[in-house]
């Protein structure tokens, strides 16, 4: 075999069912490919054909930052994927390539500056305190997802966006359907359409929007001709949905990880200044999604991992497997709060690096510090194997998280 295999030569296509997994179990299909020297081909439950799967840390960084791999070329193609529907709207920033991606991203970037996050932090902390007051008043046992992880991220991203409190239950329902493979294509597409219609209406009521909201910023960009209304709606839907659902599930995963690693939890109680470093390691360690997200299309022949990916072929990159690459992380399957440096890729890489990464970090720190400080005897109220998890979820997380204290 030559150093560079041709994509035209036979490569086995492996079917990746991406079935529901218990707890924080790492996907065995992905585990087999962690650190593989070459890349493989996969077929997922929905879409057509197959795609290349890139799993090594350096290969993932390469594919997600090289302009020869296009997100825009995915639009209109039924690329093999986990969900029956396509998550972003066609005009969303998630499907854009530079320089268009850069233009769209700038329209939202001012709402994620350190100044804005400094303004949001005390408000988020007050919301967390109020939610935990209610939970403590009710008494144990209590479901943390209901009392904290569901309402807090929804409140924070809605405050940032400018979504009124009365509309937030609808946002929660739309987001749950949109970011799941369980409801079927028709129901999921309807949720996306309804959410887009909501934001179309919101952004056209420019004068009624809070001046410091992301919706207000987007409406101003539309008025100034920086972005179209459809583009602004695409940004709003993506930020609102991912900002609520991803943080809801990932923060729940983090708390579950601590409650099932009591020595780590005890250390955080004893060393509260370790929290930011612990959050980074939890971000690396937790397998926060099922399978992979949006594919990319090669615009010309490109060699990756000793294989030539031909122009027009689809490529999926796995950030989760990159976070377990033993070439980068010593003992990658262990939770290690002393790990450093920790160059995880949990928020992505390249132009599509998550715009809300520092907002998510802030919320995770508020959730963990509030629980650790307030409930020094916090523990699971059921055996860990009895914790229920969302089924057919694109972003993994607990369905319920019963605790006592």
Image (tube, grey):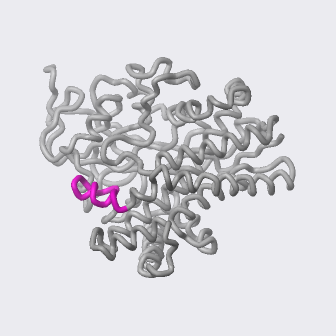
Identify the residue at the far front of this view: 115
Q: Is residue 387 left or right of residue 228?
A: right
Question: In this view of the protein, which residue sits in the foreground, 368 or 193?
Answer: 368
Does residue 105 belong to the magenta stretch? yes
Q: Name the main secondary structure of what is drawn in magenta.
A: helix
Quadrant assignment, res 77: bottom left
Question: In this view of the protein, which residue sits in the foreground, 262 or 395?
Answer: 262
Residue in the image at 13% along x and 39% along y: 301
Residue 159 position, x and y percent, is 57, 64
Q: Is residue 146 left or right of residue 48?
A: right
Question: In this view of the protein, which residue sits in the foreground, 339 or 381?
Answer: 339
Residue 401 position, x and y percent, is 71, 46
Residue in the image at 45% along x and 24% along y: 341
Where the N terminus falls, by quadrant? Answer: top left
Q: Which stretch did the figure color magenta?
A: 93-107
Quadrant assignment, res 278: top right
Residue in the image at 31% along x and 42% along y: 350
Residue in the image at 28% along x and 68% along y: 226
Residue 32 position, x and y percent, is 42, 27
Quadrant assignment, res 96: bottom left
Whether residue 298 appears in this view of the structure is: yes
Where the C terminus falls, by quadrant? Answer: top right
Q: Is residue 215 left or right of residue 223?
A: right
Question: In this view of the protein, which residue sits in the foreground, 12 or 396?
Answer: 396
Whether residue 392 appears in this view of the structure is: no
Does residue 372 belong to the magenta stretch? no
Q: Is residue 274 left or right of residue 117?
A: right
Residue 68 position, x and y percent, is 18, 44
């Amino acid at each position: 075999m030559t150093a560079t295999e041709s994509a035209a030569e036979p490569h086995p296509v492996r079917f990746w069912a991406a079935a529901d997994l218990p707890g924080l179990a790492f996907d065995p299909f992905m585990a087999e490919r962690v650190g593989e020297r070459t890349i493989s081909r996969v077929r997922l439950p929905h879409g057509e054909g197959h795609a290349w799967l890139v799993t090594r840390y350096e290969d993932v960084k390469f594919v997600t930052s090289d302009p020869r791999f296009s997100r825009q070329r995915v639009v209109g193609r039924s690329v093999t994927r986990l969900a029956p529907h396509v998550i972003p709207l066609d005009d969303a920033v998630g499907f854009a390539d530079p320089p268009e991606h850069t233009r769209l991203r700038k329209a939202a970037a001012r709402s994620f500056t350190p100044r804005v996050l400094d303004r949001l932090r005390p408000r988020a902390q007050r919301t967390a305190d109020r939610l935990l007051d209610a939970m403590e008043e009710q008494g144990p046992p209590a479901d943390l997802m209901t009392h904290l992880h569901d309402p807090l991220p929804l409140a924070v991203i809605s405050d940032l966006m400018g979504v009124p409190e009365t509309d937030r239950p609808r946002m929660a329902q739309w987001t749950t359907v949109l970011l799941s493979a369980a409801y079927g294509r028709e129901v999921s597409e309807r949720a996306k359409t309804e959410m887009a219609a909501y934001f179309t209406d919101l952004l056209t009521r420019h004068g009624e929007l809070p001046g410091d909201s992301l919706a207000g910023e987007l409406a101003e960009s539309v008025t100034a001709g920086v972005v179209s209304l459809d583009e602004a709606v695409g940004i709003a839907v993506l930020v609102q949905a991912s900002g609520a659902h991803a943080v809801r599930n990932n923060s729940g995963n983090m708390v579950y990880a601590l409650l099932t690693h009591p020595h780590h939890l005890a250390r955080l109680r004893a060393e509260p200044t370790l929290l930011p470093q612990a959050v980074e390691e939890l971000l690396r360690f937790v397998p926060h999604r099922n399978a992979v997200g949006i594919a990319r299309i090669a615009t010309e022949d490109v060699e990756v991992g000793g294989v030539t990916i031909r122009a027009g072929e689809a490529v999926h990159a796995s950030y989760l497997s990159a976070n377990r690459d033993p070439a980068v992380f010593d003992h990658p399957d262990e939770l290690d709060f002393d790990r450093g440096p920790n160059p995880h890729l949990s928020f992505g890489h390249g132009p599509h690096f998550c715009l809300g990464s520092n907002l998510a970090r802030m919320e995770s720190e508020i959730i963990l510090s509030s629980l650790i400080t307030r409930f020094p005897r916090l523990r699971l109220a059921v055996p860990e194997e009895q914790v229920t998890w969302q089924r057919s979820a694109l972003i993994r997380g607990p369905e319920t998280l019963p605790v006592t204290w």
